[in-house]
Image (cartoon, rainbow, N blue to C red):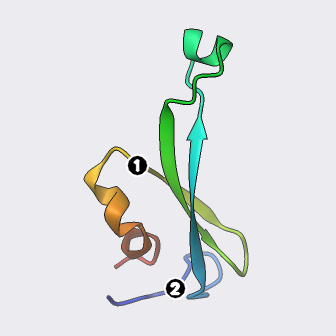
């Protein structure tokens, strides 16, 4: 993997988190969190990118974050 660094500050120190969010309509009213994402964030400056967990790109999120 060719890590180029965060696009905002150039740091190569990143972390990931899994998050769930409500959608619109009934899922929002009943607080059904059906939308799941992987968040990749720069530990230095806080820049974050969200990746849909239901796509094949979710397995390589650090590569995408670093532009690899």
Quarter of the view holding residue 29 = top right
Residue at the limit of the structure toward the left, as seen here: 56
Q: Is residue 12 above or below residue 29?
A: below
Q: Residues within 10 Å of mark 2 (few under 14, many from 20)?
A: some
Q: Residue at x 52, y 85 (%)?
A: 5
Q: Is residue 20 above or below residue 57?
A: above
Q: Is residue 61 above or below residue 42?
A: above
Place of residue 16 in the rendered image (x, y in percent of width and height, measured from the top left): 55, 67
**Placement of the C terminus among the 4 image quadrants:** bottom left
Report which residue position mark 2 lands on: 5
Q: Residue at x 73, y 76 (%)?
A: 45
Left or right: 51 as drawn, with respect to 55? right
Residue 5 seen in the figure: yes
Q: Residue at x 39, y 69 (%)?
A: 64
Place of residue 60 in the rendered image (x, y in percent of width and height, measured from the top left): 34, 68
Provide the secondary structure element on which disc 2 rests. loop
Place of residue 21 in the rendered image (x, y in percent of width and height, measured from the top left): 60, 35
Quarter of the view holding residue 8 = bottom right
Q: Are marks 2 and 1 in contact (CB under 8 Å)?
A: no
Q: Residue at x 56, y 79 (%)?
A: 6
Place of residue 51 in the rendered image (x, y in percent of width and height, measured from the top left): 45, 53
Q: Is residue 11 above or below residue 43?
A: below
Label 2, label 1: how far apart the Cα atoms are: 22 Å
Dot 2 or dot 1, earlier in sequence = 2
Q: Residues within 10 Å of mark 1 (few under 14, many from 20)?
A: some
Residue at the limit of the structure toward the right, as seen here: 45
**Placement of the N terminus among the 4 image quadrants:** bottom left
Report which residue position mark 1 lands on: 53
């Amino acid at each position: 993997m060719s890590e180029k660094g965060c696009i905002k500050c150039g740091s190569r120190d990143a972390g990931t988190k899994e998050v769930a969010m409500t959608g619109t309509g009934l899922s929002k009213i009943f607080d059904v969190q059906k939308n799941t994402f992987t968040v990749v964030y720069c530990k230095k400056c806080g820049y974050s990118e969200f990746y849909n967990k239901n796509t094949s790109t979710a397995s390589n999120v650090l590569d995408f974050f670093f532009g690899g």
